[in-house]
Image (cartoon, helix red, strand yellow):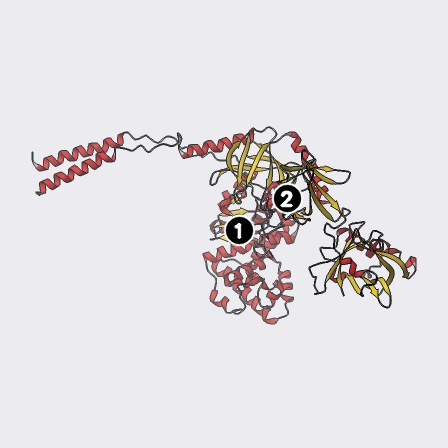
Amino acid sequence: MKLIKQYKNIALVLGLLTLASCSQEDQPTESLLNFTPKVKTDLDRWIDTNYIDPYNISVQYEWNQNVVDNNRFLFPPAIDKVQPALEIIKKIWIDSYTTIGGKDFVKIIAPRDFVLVGGVNVNPDDVSNTLGLAEGGKRISLFQVDYVDKKDRASVTEFIHTIQHEYVHILNQTKTFDVQAWSKITPKDYSSDPFSISDEEAYELGFISAYARSNYTEDFAETAAIILLNSEEDYAALLASITNPAGVAALKQKEALVVQYYRDAFNIDFYALRDEAQKNTTKVLND
Amino acid sequence: MKTKNILKYLLLIILMLQVNSCVSTDAEQKFEDSPTERLNKQKKELDDLLLSAKDGWKAVYYTDDNQLGGFTHLFKFLPNGKVDMASDFDDDTEKHNSQYEIQLGSTVSVVFTTENKIHLLSDSGNSPLAAGKGFLGDFQFLFYGQENGDLVFKSNRTVKEVRFVKATPQDWDDLKGNTIMNKNITGDINSPLFRTLETTDGTTVKKYELNYNSVVRFGTAIPLQDGNAETLKLAVAFTPTGITVRPAIIVGSQKLTDFVYNETDKSFVATGTSGAKATIQFTNAPPRLTDDYKLFLEGGGQITIGYIAANLSGAATNSPYAKAILAQVNAALPANQKIARVQIAFNDPLNGNYIAYTFTGGKATIYHFFTTSEDAVNKTIILTDDGWIGTPAARAFLKVLDDEITNPKGLYLKKESFTIFYTNVIYTYASAATPFRLTNYKF
């Protein structure tokens, strides 16, 4: 037998063996993993209709240890507090941006996941609380959901502050603001320990809050958010309460940059957005 | 070797490897089911067990029995992931509905996924011990199996054992009673200031001063006799008839845990056999008496102490009863006037002994003179009336306060080891008749 023929035969045997070795294998049966969707409650269906279907934003209100900080002693919200909190967010944040920015604005640029926590999130310093967290622009955690009082403007404003602030970060991640120009306004007073002074002391330095002193991006987000949280008159009154003219001038410069950013990056009239947010806040309170 | 041979051997080796590789594909099976099947079974087992108890489950949850007591919880698991829950954490012992889920963590666990009573133990905004740590509570419990019908869990973060015991309808009714016992051991504004723990095995008596923190439900018993150096820790939980403590109090060879409340003398007694028992009692007499009062007696040096409202009204050593008395006196004064000082001078060379009540808002000082005597057995100093400056009508509003200071059973005077605001030495005096205690600077 010629060598080549021999090899052919051997190759044939090998091929058969290879095939044979697989012939005994079990065929996969039905999956053992349970894919039955959980029974939806009325609240789940409400979230589907108002958040998931129109905006592709999911809401985690049931406890999931994987999306919270396990070193903090937190707890999930009470069932009956979830929908009121979500209604506030929908009305003041989503609806305002939708009206002014266009109906697809929030659909395109938005966090994809809300995590709701019932109680306060006390920081290790035992002085301050964390009101909200934004992770990579994709997930926003909101604390103190149990304590939001729909009838109290201060309570609603504090709660919505978080989302307004974090959403500015998300916008910044889509299109950056003029950091160069911003950095020239109050270059010296940023601090790694922003809470060492009060909000009122921060105003005098040209910051809209103590926390705004953290860095440029926080300063921008705080400035935009706090203007959105106040009516035109309230914000004017805040500026009027500042005794240092340099502080007022700095805040006005920052405000101008925010307005310019919204116009150039998203073609949004920032003052119209503020007025819409104010109108919707009043609606929430009167509902 | 010829190329032909090399190829032959090579093929032979490949062939052997090929055959060999198919030889033992069967890994040894330790279990009959796959891991997924076993987890599914375990999940179902736990859910079935939770749902099986007709009247639900009861768990006395000790989040950390080294510094916190036990909180009794009742759970009635319902279909579709709902759960009714009640606890004795606070006065609200009613059932509340929320959701639960069987989740997979490092093992199968039950998680209370929306807020209910158990979450009160994990509220960073209500932290009696370390900042932000709440009551160190968990609400996710990893399932470790069954033991005599109990379900054994461990808390997710802190790995403390939590036992679910089958509940009875009575257990649900009893929660209200638990909160009453909580009030009984906490005491109120009129309860004596101190607590003692006394144990006896029938012959040997051991006495302890009991410091009890009602917020965290935890007590520390410090021995009062020489030769007994053992401090006891008491993690307290409530029952409708009294309290249970953990660890057990060892009296002789017996272990006592269950104390029964005695309505008559407001004591809690745990009874063993052959005369063994442990008693927790309120007392107005400080468990540790001092001779500090002797300094103030007739014939001693001049010494003045004073309560200054501006600096000392917030002192923790002022008893609630004393604060109420001060508030009562202030309430009787016009709005712009308040008690500024209650200053007591002893052995003043010019004026002898007197209490000077001074006021804000321009009201004139009122003086009450007294003589001193001692009760050497009970170690108190007794202040006896020796005349006033001012008319009885003008000082009538002071009577409630003055009666406490000059009560015939006397005052326990104690030099404290802390200071407040200034470096002045602090003295407290406590009435031997009532839970009145006030904090003073020494001048």
Amino acid type at mark 2 = Leu
Left or right: B357 as drawn, with respect to A259:
right
Q: Position of residue B183 (x, y in %)?
A: 72, 42
What chain does mark 2 sit on? B
Q: Looking at the image, which residue is at 49% across and 67% down?
A: A181
Residue B113: quadrant of the picture: top right
* Quarter holding residue A237: bottom right
Q: Label 1: how many residues lie within 10 Å, few (<14), some (14-19) or many (20+)? A: some
The residue carrying mark 1 is: A98
Residue at (13% x, 33% y) in the render = A9
Chain of the residue that carries numbered disc 1 in the rendered image: A
Q: Marks 1 and 2, how far apart in space?
A: 60 Å
Give the class, few, some or many, for how many residues have Cα within 10 Å of label 2's Cα (few <14, many ≥20).
many
| A3 to the left or right of B343 | left
Asked whether the beta carbons under mark 1 and mark 2 sit within 8 Å of each other, the answer is no
**Amino acid carrying mark 1 in the image:** Thr
On the image, the x and y values in percent for residue B94 come to 67, 37
> Is residue A27 or residue B207 the one in the foreground?
B207
Q: Which mark is residue B73?
A: none
Residue B193 visible in rendering? yes
Q: Secondary structure at mark 1?
A: helix
Of tags 1 and 2, the one toward the viewer is: 2
Q: Which mark is residue B234?
A: 2
Instruction: Determine whether, in the image, residue B228 is placed left or right of residue A55.
Output: right
